[in-house]
């Protein structure tokens, strides 16, 4: 049987589809999963989904999550929506995410990383930093769910005719307000890194002051 001719690509056309990716995490309480190792402190879920939880399987075939090598079978493949994975653990690490598109797309996979976040970040005054809203809250939020969720767009440049029809068969999405409790998105990925860098700078400054004080005490002139 003859192989069907590949669908022609549509020149000078780009189509984008919004996604959200990231993780949520909560501390393990008394009701621990039976298979959770004793040293694990949190339950977390890593995911790729539509901004309002839409089914993305009309253009995503599977999502592969590469966990830390200490996990059994660290390469986990999710071939049906929801494209998410729930595990337990005690430490933060980088998760490699690979999005494979449907065969009709004839597109290369999308490869990127997400830093698994289990803990809230604090400044030197023990105030909780919420990078998603650029605001500061008190420590009362320590035991609540931690969220590290980012919005992005997948852009298909010059999609083929068949894939273009598939994309157009589902209307675009309206993003929810980032002020709602259900959907909290980071304004930009860099903000979280800026928060952590600033915390590090504060700690370095404190250490420098301590060393200056010790040095001044050691070189005090004799009476």
Image: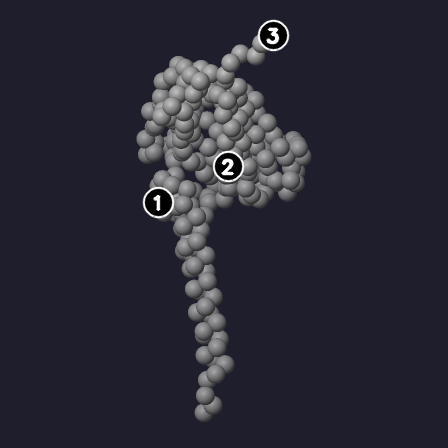
Instruction: State which tag comes first along the sequence, 2 or 1.
Output: 2
For the question of whether residue 51 can be seen, the reply is no
Q: Residue at x 44, y 69 (%)?
A: 209
Whether the residues at callouts 1 and 3 have beta carbons within 8 Å, the answer is no
Residue 221, percent across and down? 45, 88
> On the picture, is 10 further left or further right than 68?
left
For the question of whether residue 129 can be seen, the reply is yes
Kindly report the distance in space between the C-alpha atoms of the residues bearing marks 2 and 1.
24 Å
Q: State which quarter of the image contains the N terminus.
A: top right
Vertical side of 123 occupied by 173: above or below: above
Q: Which mark is residue 30?
A: none
Residue 149, percent across and down? 44, 36
Residue 183: which quarter of the image?
top left
Which residue of the protein is positioned furthest toward the top in this rendering? 1
The answer to which of 19 and 71 lies nearer the viewer is 19
Whether the residues at callouts 2 and 1 have beta carbons within 8 Å, the answer is no
Instruction: State which tag comes first along the sequence, 1 or 3.
Output: 3
**Which residue is label 3 attached to?**
1
Q: State which quarter of the image contains the C terminus.
A: bottom left
Q: Residue at x 57, y 32 (%)?
A: 65
Vertical side of 215 occupied by 42: above or below: above
Residue 64: which quarter of the image?
top right
> Could you tell me how many numbered marks the image carries?
3
Specify few, some or many for label 2: CA neighbours under 10 Å numbering under 14, 14-19, or 20 or more: few
The answer to which of 70 and 3 lies nearer the viewer is 3
């Amino acid at each position: 049987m003859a192989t069907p001719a590949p669908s022609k690509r549509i020149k000078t056309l780009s189509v984008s589809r919004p996604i959200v990716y990231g993780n949520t995490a909560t501390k393990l309480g008394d009701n621990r999963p039976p298979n959770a190792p004793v040293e694990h402190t949190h339950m977390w879920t890593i995911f790729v989904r539509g901004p309002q939880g839409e089914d993305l399987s009309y253009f995503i075939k599977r999502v592969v999550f590469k966990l830390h090598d200490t996990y059994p079978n660290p390469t986990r493949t999710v071939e049906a929506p929801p494209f998410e994975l729930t595990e337990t653990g005690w430490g933060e690490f980088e998760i490699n995410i690979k999005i494979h598109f449907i065969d009709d797309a004839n597109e290369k996979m999308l490869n990127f990383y997400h830093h698994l976040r289990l803990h809230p970040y604090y400044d030197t005054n023990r105030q909780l930093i919420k990078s998603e809203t650029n605001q500061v809250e008190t420590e009362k939020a320590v035991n609540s769910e931690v969220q590290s969720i980012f919005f992005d767009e997948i852009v298909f440049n010059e999609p083929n005719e068949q894939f273009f029809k598939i994309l157009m068969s589902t209307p675009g999405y309206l993003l929810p307000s980032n002020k709602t409790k259900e959907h909290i998105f980071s304004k930009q990925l860099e903000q979280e890194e800026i928060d952590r860098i600033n915390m590090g700078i504060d700690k370095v400054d404190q250490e420098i002051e301590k060393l200056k004080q010790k040095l001044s005490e050691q070189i005090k002139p004799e009476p």
